[in-house]
Image (spheres, rainbow, N blue to C red):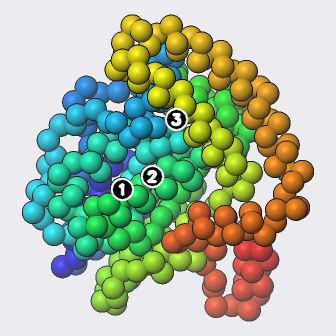
Amino acid sequence: MNKVLVVHYSQSGQLSDIARQFTQPLVDAKDVTVEFENVCPQTPYPFPWPFFRFLDTFPDSVYLDPPPILPLKVSANEEFDLIIIAYQVWFLSPSLPMTAFMQSRTAKKLLKDKPVVTLIACRNMWLLAQEEMKKMIAGLGGRLVGNVALVDEAGSVGSFLATPVWVLTGKKGPHLGGLIPKAGVAPEKVKRCDRFGARILQWFREGRTLDQDLLKNLGAVQVEESLIASEKTGRRAFRLWGRLFRALGPAGALSRQCLLVVYAVFLVVLILTVVPLNMLLNKLLAPLMRKRIEAQKAYFAEPSGSASEIVDDPIVRVQESEYIR
Ligand SMILES: Cc1cc2nc3c(=O)[nH]c(=O)nc-3n(C[C@H](O)[C@H](O)[C@H](O)COP(=O)(O)O)c2cc1C
């Protein structure tokens, strides 16, 4: 009997639904047990978010400084054959409740020497959050064997407004007659993510050791190359401003409120000027930096990669390889 632990947190329910769909083949199997651990902060985060409360959460998110969480159901002494960490991204970092889990004593015992799969659902900027998650997993002695990232259906430009509007109003949209598209991961993508659970089940049944090939050729991630530089710039700015905020006191402190107003103005100016300029510059320089960009894309796509399944049919094989290129 193989045992799987799924650790998850979700405000809207999106990520928990994805985690359930992902693991459905394992849940249905008689020879596998799946335990779900829903991480709960002692003081729940609001959803929808008041604007300034939302902004005030970035310094702790970026500095991986989470709030206390309620005691976990799972015993630290249990042994699992696979641990799935389902997390969303907050300010280019793993969300604070999931960071809290990763810093818990229970996680330290559970993850030691165990294979780990990460499952991300976010707007579309997950690359640097996953770097932080990789460090936390390695720090606990876990072995990352797979990563799946599902991003919002509205695309880079559409989700730029759609996702913030969703988390600030609680409504997915579309809004303004479609001017702001619907937020969240496309339902068809959610439905199809049981293929990952099916692959894991197959490996369990074949008695294979779970390694970094586990989720290969299933289209686990797509690395959006134009976002690599934007994430790096954004993170640098978050860390600088974050240090300033944290020097003024903890989240919610009155002294931080004035700086929040200044920061909000800075963000709007940044979004309207530096971000489009940065994207334009990257597009222009892309042909000169093709090799470096390809290497970065391959790095961020590890361990599961972006390639889709190669079906053993000559016609499909040709179509698939076209798609992969
Ligand atoms: C405080 C906060 C910050 C966020 N920052 C990011 C981000 O940096 N990158 C990103 O792709 N999505 C970001 N999102 C979107 C989330 O990753 C996620 O898609 C959304 O909150 C829905 O998750 P849920 O399952 O918890 O409802 C952010 C959401 C919140 C609430």
Number of residues whose C-alpha sits closer than 10 Å to that of mark 1, classed few (under 14), some (14–19) or many (20 or more):
some
The x and y percentages for residue 142 are: 31, 67
For the residue pair 202 and 135, the one nearer the viewer reads as: 135
Which secondary structure, mark 3? helix
Q: Which residue is rendered at x = 42% and y = 38% of the image?
A: 63
* 48 left or right of 268 in image: left
Q: Calculate the distance from the C-alpha at mark 3 to the C-alpha at mark 2.
A: 14 Å
Question: Which amino acid does the dot numbered 3 rest on?
Answer: Arg
Q: Quadrant of the C terminus?
A: bottom right
The x and y percentages for residue 324 are: 72, 74
Q: Which residue is rendered at x = 88% and y = 62% of the image?
A: 288
For the residue pair 306 and 275, the one nearer the viewer reads as: 275
Which secondary structure, mark 2? helix
Q: Is residue 6 above or below residue 48?
A: below
Question: Which of labels 1 and 3 is toward the front?
Answer: 3
The x and y percentages for residue 149 are: 53, 57
The x and y percentages for residue 124 are: 61, 47
* 15 left or right of 69 in image: right
Q: Which residue is mark 3?
A: 239
Number of residues whose C-alpha sits closer than 10 Å to that of mark 2, classed few (under 14), some (14–19) or many (20 or more):
some
Quarter of the image where one finds residue 9: top left
Q: Which residue is mark 2?
A: 132
Number of residues whose C-alpha sits closer than 10 Å to that of mark 3, classed few (under 14), some (14–19) or many (20 or more):
some
Question: Which amino acid does the dot numbered 2 rest on?
Answer: Glu
Q: Which residue is rendered at x = 25% and y = 64% of the image?
A: 111
Instruction: Say if disc 2 is inside 8 Å of ligand 1.
Output: no
Marks 2 and 1 in Cβ contact (< 8 Å):
yes
Q: Which residue is mark 1?
A: 136
Q: Quadrant of the N terminus?
A: bottom left
